[in-house]
Amino acid sequence: MPKRNPGARLEWREDRSLWEIIWYERGQRKRKSTGTDDRREAALRLSEHLAALPAGPQRPRDPSERSIAEVLTAYAEGRGSDVADAERLAYALKALVPFWGELQVGDVTETLCKAYKNQRGKADETVRRELTVLRAAINFDFDHGRLTRPVPVWLPSPGEHKDRWLTRREAAALIRAARAEPRSRRHLPLFILLGLYTAARKEAILSLRWSQVDLERGLIDLNPPGRGRTDKGRPIIPIPKRLSTFLRHAQKHTSISHVVTFHGKPVQDIKRAFAAACRSAALEDVTPHTLRHTAATWMAQAGVPMLVVSRFLGHTDSRTTERVYAHHSPDYLASAREALDRRR
């Protein structure tokens, strides 16, 4: 029986004090230096090596025959441009590869997942997000016929949802603080308004182009051309009148395709400027995602049906919306109250 090909892996070379990439081709052992003695860097070199391999027809392989580095690379290449948050995916892959990269898919167990959690030393929410990427990558491999079977991935229990949203007064204070900051007074207020009036995620706002904004029809398509529809949907939504006024003003004062710009260039990230505005406005525990949560909360408080709120948020399942926002609705459990109040 021919020897099982375990795929490419890392191996420490004592005489040169560095890591090498080892793999087999037609039964012949191959090696390539990573040029580093740092295991994290070596794991990244392994991932790059796998990404550079020529594509070709593949038979489904047993999980013990396919490396996790191969699986993560295939997932990044196949879904990287489609996921709702490509930046977050990149961070997750960077965290996963050093620990998992040289292991096989068949090595994944609950014990090993818990060992990863302990080694990371991060919050359960962070580890859960990273292991969710590993699970998605394995399922993606199975769905595309590269694995004979999927392998379960243990996840830490989800934490309680943060119910932090802005009052109208807090939102006004945040916008005033953003306008008072010389470096960000042009792009940050627009970003905040887009967040509050569209309930879009940060990445959707920063990547938004004027070609997606139809001011005449009053619509914004949050899903750019060429991006596949994902579980974290980007819907087509109506533009509220107040936001329309700000968008028309911004369009007159820009010459590039992106909506949110800084010195004639697209804004890559908003974290620092947003955090500074929150400090100035004396707001705690507020992030760019709070704007999306605020928009949905305001809609629920105004009595907008959960199904409509769900569509506005781009949720594929309205139960997700109900679980997070139903308690803000004035009609929440109204039928139960009426039943209790009813006289026999």
Image: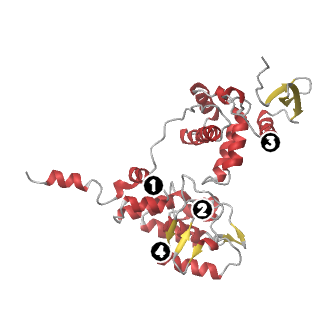
User: Label 3 crowding class (10 Å Cα cut-off): few <14, some 14-19, many 20+?
Assistant: some
Label 4 vs label 1, nearer the camera: 4
Name which residue lies at 61% across and 78% down. Answer: 250
Residue 57 in the image: state x and y as whole percent: 76, 39
Return the disc, 2 or 3, that comes first in the chain's sequence.
3
* Residue bearing mark 4: 240
Task: Answer yes or no: is residue 275 visible.
Answer: no
* Residue bearing mark 3: 48
* Residue bearing mark 1: 164
Residue 202 — which label?
none
Label 1 vs label 2, nearer the camera: 2
Quadrant housing the N terminus = top right
Return the disc, 4 or 2, that comes first in the chain's sequence.
2
Nearer to the camera, 214 or 160: 214
Residue 197 in the image: state x and y as whole percent: 49, 69
**Residue 97 image-quadrant placement:** top right
Residue 194 in the image: state x and y as whole percent: 54, 68
* Residue bearing mark 2: 204
